[in-house]
Image (spheres, helix red, strand yellow):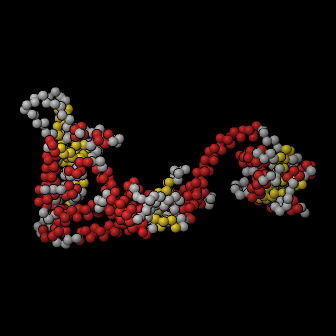
Amino acid sequence: MNNIDKHNYNPTKVYDPEKTLFGYLRVSSKIQLEEGNSIENQFTQGLRVSDQLGMELVILNEEYCSTMSKIRPKLEQVKNGIRIGVIKHLWYYSRSRWTRDEIEDGLISRNYFRKFKIKVYEGESGTLRRLDSSQDRMLDRIFTTVQQFDREQRREVSISGKKHMSRVHGETGVFMGGTINFGFKNVDKKWEVEETESRYVKKIYQMYLQGISLRNIKTFLDSEGVRPRRSKTWSLGTLNTMLKNRVYVGEYTWKDKESGELFKIVLPQIISYSMFSRVQKQITKNIKNYGNNMRKYDTLLSGVLTCGCGENITGQIKKTVNRKTYGCRSMYSQWRGKEVNKCLNTRTMNMDETDSLIVNRIKSIVGDSNILKEKFKNEVMSKKGTDSKKITFEKNMIEKSIKSIDRQLDTTIKSISINEVNHMLGKTIDVKYHEISNLLEEELIQLEDKKKSYLQEIDDLDNQKDWIDWVSKFGKDMNKRFKKPTSKFIEGIVDEIIVSPVMGETRDGKSYQRGHKFKVKFKLPIVNDSIGYKNTDKKSEGYTVDQGKKSVETQVLEVKKQGRPKKNLNRKKVHTNLLNSH
Ligand SMILES: [Zn+2]
C-alpha cells in the first residue's frame, strides 16, 4: 500500500517553506494512470529526494492530464504557492512530465523560479536545476520580444471580449456609459425613450423643417424651460448636432476609445427615417446658403444654381448702378478658409437674362410633361388627395419594414457576439467558428443593403410627395405662375441647376469665357415623358405614363459685351467676377 495520501497537500495546514519540498506528479497517458506504476514510482522517487534533503515531502498530484489539456489545477496551485511564498523548494520527476513543452517550462522558469528565487530539484537524484543555462538565456531573449506582442494582443482580445460580452448579456440598446443623449434615459444600463424629452426632439425636427431658424428654436426651448444635457440653456451647436444625430432614428455607433473598434447598437426610434432624411437635405441646403447676405434681395435662382466647380452661385444686386448678376462664390468660400476646386466660371451672368432663359425652359418642359398633367388631373381636378394619401401609406409601410430589419440586425449582431465569445472561451472549434462567422457577416451585409434600398424608397416617396404638394399648390394657374415665378415655385420642381462655362477664342488665339450653359435637374423624370395608350385604336381603354429624363440642358447664354461708353474710349479693365467688385 502506498502512503501518498499522507503526503498530499492540505490547504488548511501551515507549512514551513524552508523545510518543505513540494513534489509535482503527473502522467501523460491514461494507461500509465490505470497501471498506477508511474504515479507511485514518481512518488517514491520524490520521497527519496526529500529524505536526502532532510525535508518534508508534500505532493501535488495532477494524476492524468493529457499534453493538450489547458486545465491543470495542480500546476496552478504550484504557481500560486510560489507567488504567495509557500513554495520555496520544488521537485518534479522530469521536465517532460512537468510542463507541456519547453516554451511553457521556460516561461515558468523565468516568471516563477528566477523571479521568486525557487530551488528546483529534478529527477531520481534530485539534481538542483541551473536557471541560467544558455537555453534559459536564449528563451529569455525570445520572451522579451514576444512579450510585448503578447501583451498587446491579450489586451485587444480582452477589450473586444468585454464589449461582446456586454452585448450578449444585455438586451437591445445596451448603454455603454457617459452622458445619454437628450430624448433618452438610462434604465438599468439600457436605452429607453424619455417621453417628455422625446416630444421636444420631434418638435425640434418639425420646427427645423418648417424653416424656423436654430436661433428661434433655441429661444422656444429655453422659454419652455427645457434643459439640454450638461448645460443650462440651448446652443445652436447642440441643436445642430442633434439634428444630424442618427441616434434619433435608433442607430447608435459606439466607439471604443482604446481599440478604435465600432459597435453598432439598435435603439428605440424617435424620429422617422423620412423626417430625418428631409432634415439632412435641409441642413445641406442651409449650409450652402450660409453667409450669403444677398438673400435679402430674394433673387429667383440663388437657391438652385450651383457652379461646375461645386460651389454655390448667388445673386448680387447693385441698385446704384442697376447691375444685377449671378456669380460663383468660390473665391468667397476660399477666403473663408474652405478648400475649393479651381473655378472656370470667371464671368458673371446677367441676372434678368438668366432668369428668363431658365424660366422659359422650365415652362416648356412642364407644359409638355404628361406626368405633370396626369398628377394634376388626379390631384386637383378629380380625386384630390388620393395620391398623397397613398404615398403616406406606402411610406408608413416602409418605415415598418425598416424597423423590422433593425430588429433582425440586432439579432444578427448579437449572434456574432455570441459566436465571438464562444470562440474566445474555446467552446467552438476553429472551423465551426469561421463557418458561423462568415455566415453571420454575410447576413449582416445583406440586411444592411436591404435597409439602404428601403431608405432610398422613402426618399423617392418624399420627392413624389413634395411634387404632388407642388402640383396641388401651383398646378391650377400654371401659366400665370410662370409669368411671375417665385423661388418657392421654382424650388418645388427643380432640384439643382449646374452652371458650366462655354469657352471661345479671341482673334489672337487666346481662350476666354464667352458664355454659360445650364443643366437643369428636375425632381421627377418629366423631361420628354410620354403617354402610352394600352390600345391606340381605343384610347378609352387607358394608358400608362412613361417616365422621361430628369435633366435637360439649355442653350448657351452669351456673356454680354461691356457697354462701351462713348466718351471714354480707353475702357478700363473691369473685373466681372462679383467678388472682386465688393
Ligand atoms: Zn465656380
Viewer-proximal residue among 434 and 500: 500
Q: Is residue 515 above or below residue 259?
A: above
Residue 37 appearing in the image: no
At which x and y percent is residue 424?
60, 57
Residue at 63% over, 47% down: 151
**Quarter containing the C terminus:** top left
The answer to whether residue 503 is left or right of residue 236 is left
Q: Quadrant of residue 529?
A: bottom left
At which x and y percent is residue 187?
52, 67
The answer to whether residue 562 is left or right of residue 128 is left
At which x and y percent is residue 304?
24, 51
Q: Is residue 197 above or below residue 43?
A: below
**Quarter containing the N terminus:** bottom right
Residue at 34% over, 69% down: 397
State which image quarter holds ligand 1.
Answer: top left
Viewer-proximal residue among 551 and 68: 551
At which x and y percent is residue 535?
15, 67
Considering every residue shown, the one lying at the far left of the view is 566
Considering every residue shown, the one lying at the far top of the view is 508
The answer to whether residue 41 is left or right of residue 410 is right
Residue 286 appearing in the image: yes
Residue at 81% over, 58% down: 61
Viewer-proximal residue among 297 and 219: 219
Q: Quadrant of residue 197?
A: bottom left
Residue at 87% over, 50% down: 18
